[in-house]
Amino acid sequence: RSWLEPPLKGLRVAAAGLASLFRQRCPQFATRLASEGVRPELLCLSWLQTLFTGLAPLPRASLCRMWECWLLDGTPKVFIRVALSLLVRVEGAVGQTPVEGVVQVLRTFPQPLDACLGHKRLIVDAWLTKITNKVLRHTLAEAETCLEQGDVQLEATLLQNTVPAPKADGVLDDVELE
């Protein structure tokens, strides 16, 4: 539920955790994206938010198999693994393509990348992307802490930058009430 109900805490934590794992698995690609001002979690946010139903080129059999794994396991680990394995695949295919091209590839998975979306290949690649429950719990806990600290810092910044509301017109300033 925390993935789908405001303030989308579970979704935000999962996306931040995925970004952390992505930086570990693909440090050069992550650094290149960061140097161009792209946060990796934003590239995959729609996948996680829609539980991969928003990835148009994904075949229905792959989506059903992914959801089956999710329902049997009871954790979102399959979604994290699939997203990470797709990012690893894309890294090898895009080379030094500009960010706009990378985003387009992540939306459309053109040939020959579309072959990695088949249910047999996709799930095998996802399970080969080793993320233990312990690593996932630790990564998500760190991501949650970072997000909470970021939220507190954001609130403090907003409070510091809040301008007091102007008085109506000053007419009542000099009136004394009995």
Image (spheres, rainbow, N blue to C red):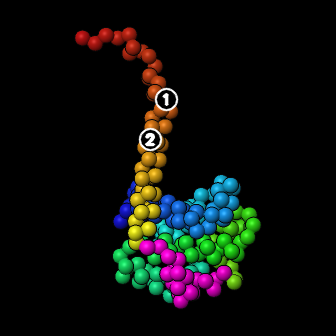
Residue 169 in the figure: left or right of residue 29: left
Q: Amino acid at mark 1?
A: Val
- Type of secondary structure dominating the magenta stretch: helix
Q: Residues within 10 Å of mark 2 (few under 14, many from 20)?
A: few
Q: Which residue is mark 1?
A: 163
Magenta residues, start to end: 113-132
Of the image marks 1 and 2, the number of the one nearer the N terminus: 2
Residue at 54%, 62% in the rendered image: 19
The answer, for residue 33, to whether it is visible in the render is no
Q: Residues within 10 Å of mark 1 (few under 14, many from 20)?
A: few
- On screen, 154 above or below 63? above
Residue at 50%, 60% in the rendered image: 16
Quote the CA–CA distance across marks 1 and 2: 14 Å
Label at residue 125:
none
Q: Which residue is mark 2?
A: 155
Residue at 40%, 78% in the rendered image: 70
Assess whether residue 126 is covered by the magenta stretch.
yes
